[in-house]
Image (cartoon, grey):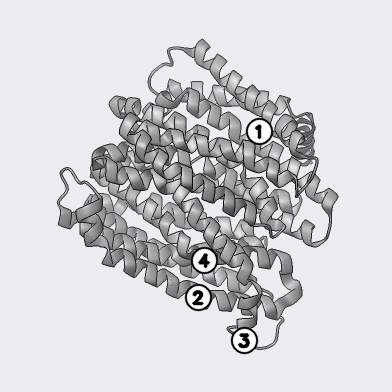
Amino acid sequence: MSRLGLNVLANFAGQFWSALMGVLFIPIYIHLMGIETFGLVGFFVTLQALAMVFDLGLAGTVNRELARRGAAEGSCVRDLVRTLEWIYWPIGALVGICVWACAGLLAETWLRPVSLHVRHVEFSIGLMGAAIAAQWPSAFYAAGLNGLQRQVLSNGLLAVFGTLRGAGVLLPLVFIAPTVEVFFIWQAICALAQSCTLASALWRSLPSSAPGKPRFSGAELAGIGAFTVSLTFIAALSFILVQADKILLSRLLPLDRFGVYVLAASAAAALARLVQPWFNSLYPRFVELHAAGDDAGLRVAYHWGSQWLAIIVLPVASVAVVFAEDLLLLWTRNTSLAGEAAPLLALLVTGSALNGLMNLPYAMQLAHGWTALALWSNVLAVGFSLPAIWWLTTQFDAAGAASVWIAINFGYVLLALPVMHRRILRGELMRWYLADVGPPAVASALSALVIRLLAAPVPDGWPTAAVLACAWLISAAAALTTCPERRRELRGWASRLLVRARA
């Protein structure tokens, strides 16, 4: 199997396992701690995303630079990692201190607890700061491993620590106390261990033939300045776009109703786990091809990745939208909670699917070192989204906020993508619309709707899982049928595996 194929499989396995650990135990957390306390967990996730704004583009930069330089510049890449490392750790510590310092203000003036005491909420937010600071460096080291295309190692380590955070926390919750304080203390311990382990793995993976110890280099920092600054602004704006609904709703809604929105958002976020492997695998490949001046190879890789991304993501999204309430009921075993969260899940998944399809075009822009389009697209989107979320929430409650996510991502697909293809991969726009994404989208949606009509009403209990699995298989098969080249490729993979199995 090629290195790219192996990286894709490793990223899928890692993301699948991380999603499983992040989603599977949420109903148990709610059962042990309550929906209002789970709202604090959702607020913690939002704070984690906010913290990454202060990454300053360093993780994305180390990914691109290690992919571009590889082992050819041993001393340079070691100096680069050391330079950025010396900046990254202090920033993480400062972010954690800021969260701790603002805990009282957030508890008293921002969140709206119903039954939890304000001091209890304040202490919990302080613990969130410790957990965020401990996990902060992990993003930098994981990005470096991805840039070196050591993605099997990276995903293996992340899967181990994801299991410790997701499943392991049940032990202290059950045997010590089912409180949010115990939850966050455990998260902080696991996060620190993860950061240290990933740091060791990256340094062991860097070329070691260079003489002398790695050192801080002002020249390296100056050389990456413009790209890093652009990524910083893009990250800040992306945070606002992705988290604006949760930030504003944490203020506009009571904490228990906010917990319902967080439940739907957590389920919708699992879709990103299907997208991230493609970005992690193809972005370094795009960088390599662009550095080599291989425009034909870039076009092949771009359409290959876009088609597979559509075939994998869109059937899952279609089933999640059409069977939203059944999926939530199977997951939570709570009829009222599933009914309340289902419309939100359908809206959020639709927006997330559109957003996921734009990941590879964004990776292509970064591979070319072109950040202006993403930056200005996000500026316009933020200017639209903030007032829209606030007003639509006052008119239509949480569903209004979720609908803004769809509108933003439709704008990316219909407006930003044509602008990109006027400069990068000219002449490939209509192929993306009409061959890569359009046919799988139509086939997936129609298949899921037909199964929904034929299966109505969906049987309660575990037979629901069988219906959902069948709906996904049929939708995926329909999407694959619309892409003949990918269908032949899959048959070739299956034939080779069969030959090896017989041998």
Distance from Cα at disc 1 to Cα at disc 2:
40 Å
Distance from Cα at disc 3 to Cα at disc 1:
47 Å
Distance from Cα at disc 4 to Cα at disc 3:
26 Å
Instruction: State the mark number for residue 56.
Output: 4
* Total number of numbered discs in the rendering: 4
Identify the amino acid type marked 1: Ile
Report the side of 265 relative to 9 (left or right).
Answer: left
Residue that appears at 50% across and 53% down: 237
Identify the amino acid type marked 3: Lys
How crowded pointer 2 is (Cα within 10 Å; few <14, some 14-19, many 20+) is rated as some
- Element under disc 1: helix
Sooner in the amino-acid sequence: mark 4 or mark 3 = 4
Examine the rendered structure and indicate whether residue 369 appears above or below residue 499: below
**Is the residue under label 2 in contact with that under label 1 (CB below 8 Å)?**
no
Q: Mark 3 = which residue?
A: 213
How far from the left and from the top, in percent, is residue 87? 50, 75
Sooner in the amino-acid sequence: mark 4 or mark 1 = 4
Q: Mark 1 = which residue?
A: 311
Residue mark closest to the camera, 3 vs 2: 2
How crowded pointer 1 is (Cα within 10 Å; few <14, some 14-19, many 20+) is rated as many
Distance from Cα at disc 3 to Cα at disc 2:
18 Å
Q: Is residue 316 visible?
A: yes
**Is the residue under label 2 in contact with that under label 4 (CB below 8 Å)?**
yes
Sooner in the amino-acid sequence: mark 3 or mark 1 = 3
Q: Mark 2 = which residue?
A: 87
The answer to which quarter of the image holds residue 23 is top left
Q: Is residue 185 visible?
A: no
